[in-house]
Image (spheres, rainbow, N blue to C red):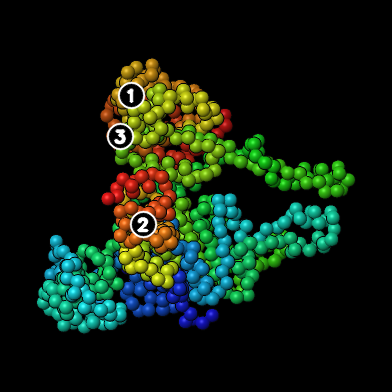
Amino acid sequence: MSENMKFTGSNTYIASEELMAAVDVARVLEKPLLIKGEPGTGKTMLAEAISQSLNMPLYIWNIKSTTKAQDGLYVYDTVQRLYDSQFGGKDVDNIAQYIKLGKLGEAFKNEEQVILLIDEIDKADLEFPNDLLWELDKMEFYIHETGETVKAKKRPIVIITSNAEKELPDAFLRRCIFHYISFPEPAQMDEIVRAHFETIDENLLKQAMDTFYWIRTLKEVRKKPSTSELIDWLRALIHGGIEPEVIRTTMPYLGVLIKKDEDLQVVNKRRF
Amino acid sequence: MFTGFFYTLKNKGLDVSTTEWLTLHDALDKGLAHSSLEEFYYLGRMILVKRESDFDKYDLAFMEYFKGVRSEDEVPQHILDFLDKQDMKFDTQNKELYSINVKRDANEVKRLFRERLGEQHTEHNGGNYWIGTSGGSAFGHHGRNPGGIRVGGESGMRTAFQVMGERRYQDFRHDKTLDIRQFQVAFRRLRQFSSKLDVPKTELDINKTVDSTCSNGGFLQLEFDKPRKNTVKLLLLFDCGGTMMPFAELSNNLFQAVHKANHFKDVKTYYFHNCIYGKVYKSAECEMGDWYDLDYIFRHTDKDYKVIIVGDAQMAPEELFDLNGNYSGPNDGMSGYEWNQLIKSKYKKVVWLNPRRHVGMSNSVGWMESEEALAQLYDMYPLTVDGLKAAITKLMETK
């Protein structure tokens, strides 16, 4: 890959200069990029945007509470092999055919340089990040059953996202480049919204943004509405043909912005 | 290079490791800072700082160490001094003036800014050219230029593309006495595996499979078993009395650690005020009537629940020993001490975590008496990581 390739955001993803620099540093230093931020600030979308912008394939490994580090490397399907040994048809001595690579394994096997997104790493067990230290450092792992070492031909660009549900271990953090996506300021939000709508009524946008940021200032609101919810809300407003003047006072389709019952009550109580 | 900066960071309480420091130098070698102080700031932050709550410490360290460095964007003190005015209002009426300022491109503004810095020696307020307050110039504050550089003053319209010396991450800062993670790791030891639970059989049992296959004349017969699950059930009782206020955050960390640990079979949390009597509260506010009878709790938990009581055990002797000692609710016929004895006898394992114990605070003689009485009744440990580990060992040992 040529050195002057640089991530500059994409048509639908507006990245701050800081974020673009962070992606660049992570790529050049060959370290995983850890992205933290409020829900709805576009952590997951970042990987898609990078993959588009640099024209590299994207592998997404979604982490759940039950995910083990091993799942990302490979799974050995013992039961299938036992069945095959019974009913024949396949050469059961060839263990390799019962090894199924996980997302990490697939990303390593790819001939090209790829983007690997490890999404919501904090969902998994407390020790999960520690179990991946070697694999992410060396970009290789060993398959015991076949004695094969899977090694990345070109180091993938690794993006890791976290919602800060759990504290991550220090040993893991030390190896990462860290970027915190702060909630967009109105000016940047304006840019983000415009990237999603070809044309938008200026007055409608202004009224909706004012209301949106006003709701975010309410301390009692527990789940603050995020970027993606603002965009959904704007869609709803446009689709419903709402007059911009009444947005502040009647707040139509508020359920799109606010998902909790208690929060709805708070907003209804505080509005003019 | 910049070894002093490393120690400035350490002094500000940032735990920067040697690995990270070397990574930063590697990045500098590769020219990632582009010989700019601003980009060096971001580069250092993304490599050395891994929590947004630490950004503020980094900002402080950076300002302290690099304050002597004269960057080309630096604003001389005499200009900052006259800009330092309180009570400025934005001139929002004058729409005409606003509109004549076309947005310049960022590099152009930067270049002009440097030019002005070189020329300007006096104070300017209003006007469209110099660095000053109000007016339509691209430099200064409380002005109407949408794409300028803000110099000093409060952030108002937030349209300046470059904001200098602003500690934006101050709010994220929280100096934690103890890491939640350390508590979480300690709680990991609170587990007892059993396969006697009522869950589907999903795990392949190799031994049984071999046996069945053999007795099946060599034809494969798969056998499954129930997966082993943690069977530990927890009952937490938190003291929310006034004397616990200084330890609110510590208790909260413990609370968070337990609730983020998802490996327990069941966790029940209740609250009490100073001393446990016949009722425990459902919420930390300890409001009258918002409670369960202790009897109700006893009926809904069996003796295998492991009980952790968190409190400072600070109370007047009569609160513990008198039949009418409870000043914030009913006593329910027994003294606090007798209620505590009942809890102790009801459950197999009970420990008390006391946030006050390790601090070595001096007690008044009377309060000391209650604390010692409870410490003799329960196994009492200080609320520290080591104390928690010891308490958990106590909870797990089999007698």
The relative height of residue B146 versus residue A170 in the rendered view (above or below) is below
Indicate the secondary structure of the residue bearing disc 1: loop
Instruction: Say which amino acid is labelled 2.
Output: Ser
Instruction: Say which amino acid is labelled 3.
Output: Thr
Residues under numbered marks 3 and 1 in contact, where contact means CB atoms less than 8 Å apart: no
Front residue of this view, candidates A216 and B274: A216
Instruction: Say which amino acid is labelled 1.
Output: Gly
Front residue of this view, candidates B309 and B384: B309
The answer as to whether the residues below labels 3 and 1 share one chain is yes
Residues under numbered marks 3 and 2 in contact, where contact means CB atoms less than 8 Å apart: no
Please say whether residue B29 is visible from this viewpoint. Answer: no
Mark 2 chain: B
Mark 3 chain: B
The relative height of residue B83 versus residue B187 in the rendered view (above or below) is below
Picture coordinates of residue B94, whole percent (x, y): 17, 70
The residue labelled by disc 2 is B53
